[in-house]
Image (cartoon, rainbow, N blue to C red):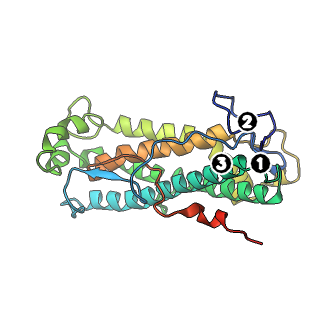
């Protein structure tokens, strides 16, 4: 049985408190648990959406909405890619856990863990970047919150095609519960604040350990160097997926069935062949 510190194995089914995966020394090479519950799946490689608009998206009469749609497409691809990488990481260690002939520890495992942690934390970090010269979820939400009157109920409903038009008003209620006629900026601002809070520990770790080498941490002068847990990382990824579904509906009138793609090819075939 492939076990990690704390005695947690792939058979663990109850919730455990999140444990630190990165420390004063940097990224640790021994996760407390590598078995993680798989979330809901979508049906295609790129994240399945059910569209109410019929066919591909057409340019609107509002150039700002078109720009927001373009930014959302970039954000969509990044988050789906992040969910895809998490799926591969989980499944590879499922394979490791299921094979008693494999060693319980290996430099290869550490290399895979380091690579995934670096990639995933940086992907989360990019989505909370609010600088004006970047494309990110935080920047997109900030723009919508600053100009909520651009997205009106009338425009949103007009994007639906029969028979989905019957759902349009109800769908827009999530963004305009008071039925004032346009997006409630407080709802978008609250989503932005939740994103920054949920991803805060991940962003700080990525800034201090991955994107840059913090001087005090590197020289062991920091009293409390930043840490992040598997739980915090997964919570940030899950919340990004949740937000993506919400704002796909607002800007493209598409309902996402999930951000985590299902790989159509037999990607595990490579592990069924001897490498040496």
* Quadrant position of residue 268: bottom right
* Quadrant position of residue 269: bottom right
Q: Is residue 240 left or right of residue 148?
A: right
Which comes sooner in the sequence, label 2 or label 1? 2
Which residue is most to the bottom? 276
> Is any atom of residue 199 visible in this view?
no
Q: Which residue is mark 2?
A: 19
Which of the two discs, 2 and 3, sits closer to the camera?
Answer: 3
Which comes sooner in the sequence, label 2 or label 3? 2
Residue drawn at 24 percent across, 38 percent down: 171
Residue drawn at 29 percent across, 46 percent down: 250
Classify mark 2: helix, strand or loop.
Answer: loop
- x, y percent for residue 139: 45, 53
Q: Quadrant of the N terminus?
A: top right
- x, y percent for residue 249: 30, 46
Q: CA distance from mark 2 to mark 1?
A: 25 Å
Q: CA distance from mark 2 to mark 3?
A: 19 Å
Q: Which residue is mark 1?
A: 100
Q: CA distance from mark 1 to mark 3?
A: 12 Å
Q: Nearer the viewer, residue 247 or 97?
A: 97
- x, y percent for residue 50: 28, 50
Q: Residue 164's mark?
A: none
Is the residue marked by circle 2 packed among few (<14), some (14-19), or many (20+) residues within 10 Å?
some
Classify mark 3: helix, strand or loop.
Answer: helix
Q: Which residue is mark 3?
A: 94
Residue drawn at 82 percent across, 59 percent down: 107
Q: Nearer the viewer, residue 260 or 27?
A: 260
């Amino acid at each position: 049985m492939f076990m990690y510190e704390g005695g947690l194995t792939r058979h663990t089914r109850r919730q455990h408190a999140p444990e630190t995966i990165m420390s004063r020394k940097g990224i640790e090479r021994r996760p407390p648990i590598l078995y993680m519950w798989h979330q809901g799946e979508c049906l295609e490689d790129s994240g399945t959406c059910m569209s109410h608009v019929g066919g591909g998206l057409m340019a609107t009469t509002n150039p700002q909405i078109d720009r927001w749609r373009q930014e959302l497409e970039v954000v969509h691809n990044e988050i789906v890619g992040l969910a895809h990488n998490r799926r591969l990481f989980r499944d590879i260690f499922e394979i490791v856990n299921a094979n008693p002939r494999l060693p319980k520890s290996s430099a290869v495992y550490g290399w895979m863990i380091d690579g995934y942690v670096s990639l995933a934390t940086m992907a989360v970090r990019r989505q909370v970047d609010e600088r004006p010269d970047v494309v990110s979820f935080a920047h997109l939400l900030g723009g919508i919150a600053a100009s909520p009157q651009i997205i009106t109920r009338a425009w949103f409903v007009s994007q639906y095609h029969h028979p989905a038009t019957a759902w349009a008003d109800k769908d827009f209620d999530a963004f305009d519960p008071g039925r004032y006629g346009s997006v409630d900026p407080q709802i978008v601002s609250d989503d932005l604040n939740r994103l920054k809070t949920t991803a805060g520990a991940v962003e700080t770790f990525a800034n201090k350990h991955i994107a840059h080498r913090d001087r005090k941490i590197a020289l062991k002068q920091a009293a409390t160097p930043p840490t992040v847990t598997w739980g915090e990382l997964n919570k940030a990824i899950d919340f990004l997926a949740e937000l993506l579904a919400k704002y796909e509906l607002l800007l493209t009138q598409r309902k996402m069935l999930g951000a985590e793609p299902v790989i159509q090819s037999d990607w595990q075939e490579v592990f069924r062949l001897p490498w040496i």
